């Protein structure tokens, strides 16, 4: 007697065929999670990237948070690239945050849900490539952001942020 019914076997065969014909995806590794590099994309090149960060445990109560950030980057010139990001946040916490001494209320009330967190743009201009200058690279960064949800507990907010940077990078020989 077969373990799979004919319909189940057909579905399994179709799934396996689909998985075997999917073209390979390629991505570069994120060597240092939240560190910026000076490299920009070549002119006309595009890159799509999504990152998921899971946070848990505040030492009390129950806490779980998932941050998803999706990026589309485009090389405007060989030295200038721009990116657009969409950010999402899922939170589930109960009793994870301390209470205030005055009234005994939680600093961050219990919350659960998945939300659109915000968006940001990034503009990066490469002044010096580490591949042409003895391993030293230099770039300018401008990153305006808008947040609708507070990343600590998921509370509704309206925050505008402007991040600027002078990026310095040194590549070491292998």
Image (spheres, helix red, strand yellow):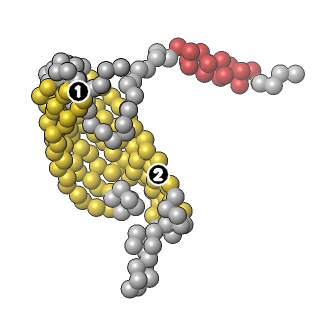
Evaluate whether residue 111 shows in this view: yes
Q: Nearer the viewer, mark 2 or mark 1?
A: 1
Residue 169 location (% of width, % of height): 23, 32
Residue 166 location (% of width, % of height): 15, 39
Residue 142 location (% of width, % of height): 15, 41
User: Residue at 49% of width from left, 62% of height from top?
Assistant: 58
Other-residue count near label 2 (Cα within 10 Å), few / some / many at <14 / 14–19 / ≥20: few
Residue nearer the viewer, 133 or 102: 133
Return the residue found at the far right. Answer: 1
Q: Along the polypeptide, which appears first: circle 2 or circle 1?
A: 1
Residue nearer the viewer, 86 or 67: 67
Return the residue found at the far bottom. Answer: 102
Tell whether 167 sits left or right of 1: left
Evaluate whether residue 43 shows in this view: no
Q: Is residue 62 positioned above or below 26 on the image? A: below
Q: Secondary structure at mark 2?
A: strand
Other-residue count near label 1 (Cα within 10 Å), few / some / many at <14 / 14–19 / ≥20: many
User: Residue at 16% of width from left, 33% of height from top?
Assistant: 139
Number of numbered discs? 2
Residue nearer the viewer, 173 or 20: 173
Q: Which residue is mark 1?
A: 39
Return the residue found at the far left. Answer: 127
User: Residue at 45% of width from left, 64% of height from top?
Assistant: 111
> Residue 130 occupies which quadrant of the picture?
top left
Residue 67 location (% of width, % of height): 40, 47
Query: Which quadrant: the N terminus?
Result: top right
Q: Is residue 154 positioned above or below 78 on the image? A: below
User: Residue at 66% of width from left, 22% of height from top?
Assistant: 12
Q: Secondary structure at mark 1?
A: loop
Q: Which residue is mark 2?
A: 55
């Amino acid at each position: 007697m077969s373990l799979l019914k004919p319909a189940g076997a057909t579905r399994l065969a179709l799934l396996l065929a689909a998985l075997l014909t999917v073209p390979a995806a390629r991505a570069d590794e994120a060597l240092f999670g939240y560190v910026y590099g000076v490299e920009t994309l070549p002119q006309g090149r595009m890159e799509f990237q999504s990152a998921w960060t899971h946070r848990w445990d505040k030492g009390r109560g129950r806490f779980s948070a998932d941050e998803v950030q999706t990026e589309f980057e485009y090389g405007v010139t060989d030295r200038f690239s721009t990116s657009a990001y969409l950010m999402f946040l899922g939170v589930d916490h109960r009793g994870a945050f301390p209470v205030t001494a005055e009234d005994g209320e939680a600093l961050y009330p219990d919350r659960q849900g998945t939300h659109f967190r915000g968006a940001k743009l990034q503009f990066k201009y490469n002044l010096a490539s580490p591949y042409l200058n003895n391993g030293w690279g230099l770039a300018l960064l401008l990153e305006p952001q808008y947040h609708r949800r507070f990343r600590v507990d998921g509370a509704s907010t309206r925050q505008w942020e402007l991040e600027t940077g002078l990026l310095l990078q040194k590549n070491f020989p292998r």
